């Protein structure tokens, strides 16, 4: 007997030492786990807003979460949570021994693991650093970590971490996210019933998801409210009022992405920010959602018009697409950006990533160079046919450009040639001004990858709609080109400014020289190829562009304050069909867009300003503008007094 007692004592001592060793090892292991909770830095969703601070999209990676400080969380949320999860939270030391004993007895009675008895502190530990395996070792770690954590963090800090980390179902992490997601409300706007529904979710997020099991969610919330009443935390009147409520629940998509081409471009421009989807940034764009919606609608309007003219062309229906870019002239702010007619069918952004031949939309730049060299609006050039012989790999080739419709007009003024978009007159103009000068100035205006031959006169090279919008600012912004800006500013999760989009501008020509072309582009819409872009009650200017066989159709136009570039074409670079020119396909879309914009923004400037130093005269019934640098052709007879602006 004495030997047995000694043996038992030795075993006991060994057992104590083993427990000490296990506890020591476990305590050592939890140091890293403690740091993870102390320095809690969860992924937080980034939000993208328009210029009026309306939500465009949420960006996130694996967890969709908005972070809420403890001060943001209403006291009622805390009370409701403690009611069902840990009533004695503010009294225990991280572990509730009474709750653990009750859970053990219940588990023994049921002969299975039925209840855990974990405090909120323990639940936080399980959620962040431990597995959910029901083992003695894991439970020991949990208890030790809970005891240590309560000495390092305040109760409020523990609750803040718990309510931000916990999964609330439907893809929502954190109470703030769930509040906005289920009810479209900030937390301080929640009713007591809505709060009860939210705090019920962590126990069984899928089962109590109100978008899937609304009745179960209400029943569970009612239990929470009754328990709060039993504890004296809400009055009988509050209980009865809340029990009768049936809150509206929303089943929204998590991203809420209303402008996918814009959001893709934002991510492309910010690809160097490695935590873009998890850093909790607020990105404010220059996009105006009203303009964006109208641009999308307008682009689709033109798309349907083209299809209606070619109902039997199945290839057109499959391949036809378009793009739309809207800028603010004097700031370069991108107000709308549409990269295709249907993002679901194709997410390729034709507004920023494509390079399509620009056709006759290049001509205003050629005429700007000509007039800046001294040739006036009334200067006459021959609109006659020319044939050009050249060689490719020692093989003789012949280029015989033609006007649209193959008409020849003889001698025409620069104003008429550009307004009517005469190809032959334009080629002759380039030769008169000098090819090298024209080529170099096109590069100055922003064009790239141009062939070094006369075909550039007809826009034989490519550009994206955004590039065209930028380059066209030399007209819409009176000679000053500003780098188009999609992003206005970026604020990080702490509220610090990390980016602010500043204006980068370059003056390429004098304002009065630019106006000489603006006037002709205004006439192009009144009397030329852009007639279908005309808008009642506001002056607009613009240029059509069409490539061979109607493969690409452009319209680049502007009012005194807003510029818009529209492109249509097939993704396989084949013809859209007969008549689908820049004047037929995109020009009416420009008019459709501006008429809609004037409905929501009637205060837009209606008339172009005439810069100082610009004068005009009537010659043979036609009004021409001129400057000191570009005087009128004196070989013409004037029939009225000049007007000085």
Image (cartoon, helix red, strand yellow):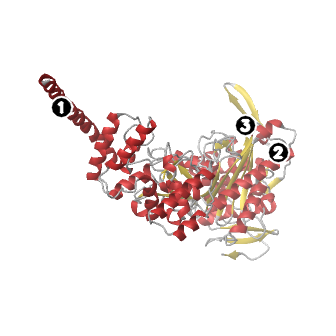
Q: How many marks?
A: 3
Give residue 211's position: percent from left, percent from top.
62, 50
User: Residue under circle 3?
Assistant: 573
Give residue 453's position: percent from left, percent from top.
66, 39
- Mark 3 packing: few (<14 Cα in 10 Å), some, or many (20+)? some
Q: Nearer the viewer, mark 2 or mark 3?
A: 2
User: Residue under circle 2?
Assistant: 307
Q: Mark 2 to mark 1: distance in Å? A: 84 Å
Element type at marker 1?
helix
Query: Left or right: where does residue 376 sit relative to residue 266?
Result: right
Q: Residue at x 46, y 64 (%)?
A: 76
User: Residue under circle 1?
Assistant: 17
Res 376 label: none
| Quarter containing the C terminus | bottom right
Camera sees residue 257:
no
Q: Residue at x 50, y 65 (%)?
A: 188
**Dot 2 and dot 1 residues touching (CB under 8 Å):** no
């Amino acid at each position: 007997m004495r030997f047995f007692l000694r043996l038992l004592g030795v075993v006991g001592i060994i057992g104590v030492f083993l427990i000490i060793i296990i506890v020591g090892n476990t305590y050592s292991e939890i140091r890293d786990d403690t740091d993870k909770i102390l320095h809690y830095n969860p992924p937080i969703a980034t939000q993208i807003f328009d210029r009026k601070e309306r939500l465009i999209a949420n960006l996130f990676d694996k967890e969709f979460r908005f972070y809420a400080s403890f001060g943001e969380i209403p006291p009622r949320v805390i009370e409701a949570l403690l009611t069902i999860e840990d009533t004695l939270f503010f009294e225990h030391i991280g572990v509730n021994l009474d709750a653990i004993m009750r859970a053990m007895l219940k588990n023994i009675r049921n002969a299975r693991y039925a209840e855990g008895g974990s405090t909120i502190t323990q639940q936080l530990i399980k959620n962040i650093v431990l597995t959910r395996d029901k083992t003695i070792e894991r439970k020991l770690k949990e208890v030790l970590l809970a005891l240590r954590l309560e000495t390092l963090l305040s109760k409020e800090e523990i609750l803040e971490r718990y309510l931000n980390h916990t999964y609330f179902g439907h893809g929502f992490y954190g109470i703030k996210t769930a509040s906005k997601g289920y009810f479209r409300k900030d937390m301080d706007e929640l009713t007591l019933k809505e709060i009860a529904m939210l705090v019920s979710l962590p126990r069984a997020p899928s089962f109590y998801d109100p978008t899937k099991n609304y009745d179960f969610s209400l029943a569970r919330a009612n239990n929470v409210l009754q328990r709060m009443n039993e504890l004296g935390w809400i009055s009988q009147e509050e209980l009865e009022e809340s029990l009768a409520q049936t809150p509206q629940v929303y089943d929204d998509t998590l991203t809420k992405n209303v402008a996918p081409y814009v959001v893709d471009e934002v991510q492309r421009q910010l690809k160097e920010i490695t935590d873009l989807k998890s850093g909790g940034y607020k990105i404010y764009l220059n996009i105006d959602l009203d303009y964006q919606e109208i641009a999308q609608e307008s682009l689709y309007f033109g798309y349907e018009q083209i299809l209606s003219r070619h109902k039997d062309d199945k290839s057109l229906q499959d391949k036809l697409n378009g793009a739309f870019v809207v800028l603010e002239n004097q700031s370069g702010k991108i107000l709308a950006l549409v990269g295709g007619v249907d993002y679901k069918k194709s997410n390729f952004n034709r507004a920023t990533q494509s390079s399509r031949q620009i056709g006759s939309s290049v001509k205003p730049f050629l005429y700007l160079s000509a007039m800046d060299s001294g040739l006036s609006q009334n200067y006459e050039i021959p609109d006659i046919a020319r044939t050009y012989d050249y060689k490719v790999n020692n093989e003789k080739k012949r280029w015989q450009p033609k006007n649209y419709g193959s008409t020849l007009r003889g001698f025409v003024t620069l104003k008429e040639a550009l307004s009517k978009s005469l190809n032959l007159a334009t080629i002759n103009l380039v030769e008169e001004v000098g090819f090298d000068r024209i080529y170099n100035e096109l590069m100055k205006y922003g064009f790239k990858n141009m062939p070094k031959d006369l075909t550039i006169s007809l826009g034989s090279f490519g550009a994206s709609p955004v590039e065209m919008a930028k380059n066209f600012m030399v007209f819409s912004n009176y000679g000053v080109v500003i780098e188009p800006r999609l992003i206005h500013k970026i604020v990080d999760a702490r509220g610090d400014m990390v980016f602010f989009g500043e204006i980068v501008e370059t003056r390429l020509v004098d304002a009065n020289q630019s106006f000489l072309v603006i006037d002709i582009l205004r006439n192009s819409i009144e009397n030329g190829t852009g007639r279908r872009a005309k808008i009642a009650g506001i002056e607009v200017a613009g240029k059509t562009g069409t490539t061979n066989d109607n493969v690409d159709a452009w319209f680049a136009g502007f009012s005194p304050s807003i510029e818009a570039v529209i492109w249509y074409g097939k993704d396989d670079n084949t013809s859209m069909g007969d008549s689908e020119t820049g004047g037929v396909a995109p020009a009416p879309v420009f008019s459709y867009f501006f008429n809609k914009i004037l409905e929501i923004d009637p205060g837009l400037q209606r008339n172009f300003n005439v810069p100082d130093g610009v004068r005009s005269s009537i010659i043979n019934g036609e009004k021409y503008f001129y400057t000191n640098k570009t005087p009128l052709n004196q070989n013409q007879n004037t029939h009225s007094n000049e007007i000085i602006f």
